[in-house]
Image: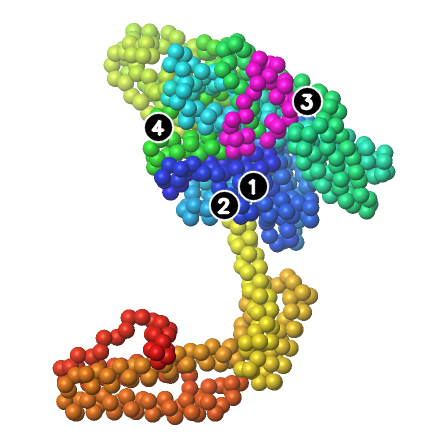
Amino acid sequence: MSVAGFDIGNENCVIAVVNPGGMLDVLLNDESKRETPAVVSFSEKQRFLGSTGATSAMMNPKSTISQVKRLIGRKFGEADVQNDLKLFPFETSESQDGGILVRLEYLGETHTFTPVQILGMLLSNLKQITENSTNKPISNCVIGIPCYFTDVQRRAYLDAATIAGLKPLRLIHDCTATALGYGIYKTDFSNVGPTYIVFVDIGHCDTQVCVASFESGHMKILSHAFDANLGGRDFDEILFSYFVSQFKEQYNIDVYTNIKASIRLRASCEKLKKVLSANAGAPLNIECLMNEKDVKGFIRREEFEKLSSGLLERIKIPCQKALAESGLDVEKIHSVQLVGSGSRIPAISKILSFLFNREPSRTIDASECVAHGCALQCAMLSPLFRVREFEVQDSFPFSIGFSSDKGPICTLSNGMLFPRGQPFPSVKILMLYRTNTFQLQAFYADQNEPLSVASSQISSFTIGPFQTSHAEPARVKVRVQLNLHGVVNILSASLIEDFLDNSARGNAHSTSEEDAISHHASATSDAEEGIVRKGKLTKRMIPVNESVYGGMTKAELSEAVAKEHQLVQQDLKMERTKEKKNALESYVYEMRDKFSNMYRAFATESEREGISRNLQETVEWLYEDGVDESENVYTVRLEDLKKLVDPIENRYKDEEARAQATKDLLKCSKDYRMVVEAHTLASKVRDAVVDECTKVEQWLQEKVKQQEALPKDADPILWSGEIKRKSEALDLTCKYIMRSSGSPPPVKDETNDSDRGRKSDYMELD
């Protein structure tokens, strides 16, 4: 089994796999491309995913969903979401819980899908591409995510993977994956101290920066910073707005009012941006953009950079923030690695050169580095692979606090259970004193951190019910985890009761008004908790129920899985229908050609006219009433045609087969005649064998004579199958006669019938 790494970009996706032999490969999709568009398009009866979905975007813009990554785990009313929705051609609405619903027409009805369901469709498509390419089932994977993703967004990715039938071993930050792919193969790190590398990833919709420390066999992320609303598409939008204004003035057209024109112009602006990366200026030409008008434009790189000056200035902010939080000076940075689809603008390189006093390096593949790192991390986490020892220590970019019904949990880090920069996975143990069921809430503790969430609440945990053996509060031990995905959960809760004497109990509960915390990755012992005990200690597990703010419930997830299964079955049904339709169409044109040439002599005039008429009627039906029919209708049509054509086709095919079968039968008879002449046999045996051969030869001669008297367009009276059966019967009869007399039968030629026939022909020519 292979393991896969998925880079789910805002515009394109990349799949990398590590094969059992240890080879790291980027997979090609059905169009032999290394990038697959992150697009889902719905037609009337079928979905089109990836490349085929992108092709359908112009025909069905309102039913084509792209850039779903921007909508995952977000609320409909958020300002950033509303700005994004203005750019999208598909229709959206607000769900009952404030989330986002995508509305579209499918199977004659209006359907709504959540962004998680759409992402599940994309992952399902990537899974299918992976299995088709490797010819192996795929389950384990690692998925790249932006470091700024919140808890609910990370959970949404896990839910989408479940919908697609995948099992993510880890959700890894994009820059962390890039750093892993960069560092695991390098062997020239200094032995004196750490090597510090800055990774700047400018993607289609965001900018992420991290500072990583490398030592031999070890990698540590020192800091993360980001701008979730600054990417390559924002530079595209600068060009788009520029040309919209220009075309409105020159051609009196408003591209904003036409969805298809907007899509075409945005696509052209993206290509223009790439041209400007290598040229001082670039033209823009689009035929029949809108109102049957051809448009032309031109822009110079200096003008583009001037228009984009505000965006270029914003590039500095996450870079400066990441460097400041790492605690390093610019002089300690060894190199700056620039990646991402939006990183090719020359002005960005100039800004980074100024910030870090060195030219940024482009030695890493800008589009595939995240997928490489994801696949490597998956191989490291999978028990099926042996990978060189390389420790990956990531840091969490947000601060998370916990509170209870008695107020915030007291900690030593400004009220934060998991402070910003916390290495993860991490487990912390809370020691609480309670008498019955209580609740804990997880929340984002620092309001100054730029989170894209409407509420700071993460999740709520109900711990209980439980009962204590005495009226005084009992200790409840809660293990809280920031897991490998960056998701907060409670691993377990247990009730610890002490049966002490009165003096010991008084001492034990003297701090019952305070909640304590232990910073350990595993359960702490009683001695580590600093409590001296006398008497009997009991420990009982307590149930924990979790409620995630904005997350999917188990029932909703099960319903989404079932819905995806229905959609897949509908897609397969439509693919089978297309195959049957194509098979019918191919058969019609193939038979048309054959009846004009090969089959012509084998059909009577009435048969040719009837079949030709049926073929023509089928062609007309296919392009009129039969354009959109069911699989069964196409199957029946094909079977009806074959009933007419098969008799003629059988006559044609049997003529060649009959000639070969005749040669084989004569050779079999000849071989047995030669055997009985070469061996000393009783005359009775010899005569019996010769008699059998003679009877068969006479039968064949008579039948061949009758067959040759018939025209080719008549059904044969001598079929090749009948000759083969005669040959087999002769062989068995002669063998039986010779064995009963103790004589060995001839050794049968091991070559196939056609080869034997060709050898026989060659000998006759000699």
The residue that label 3 is drawn on is 311
The Cα atoms of the two marked residues, 1 and 4, are separated by 30 Å
Position of 534 with respect to 201 (left or right) is left
Q: Earlier in the sequence, mark 3 or mark 4?
A: 3
Position of 739 with respect to 365 (left or right) is left
* Residue sitting farthest toward the front: 766
Highlighted magenta segment, given as a residue range: 341-369
Q: Position of residue 220 (x, y in %)?
A: 44, 19
As drawn, the label of residue 36 is 1
Give the amino acid type for the residue marked by disc 2 in the picture: Ile
Q: Are marks 2 and 1 in contact (CB under 8 Å)?
A: yes
Give the amino acid type for the residue marked by disc 1 in the picture: Thr
The Cα atoms of the two marked residues, 3 and 4, are separated by 41 Å
The Cα atoms of the two marked residues, 4 and 2, are separated by 28 Å
Q: Are marks 1 and 4 in contact (CB under 8 Å)?
A: no
Helix, strand or loop at mark 1: strand
The residue positioned 55% from the left and 53% from the top of the image is 571
Helix, strand or loop at mark 3: helix
As drawn, the label of residue 129 is 2
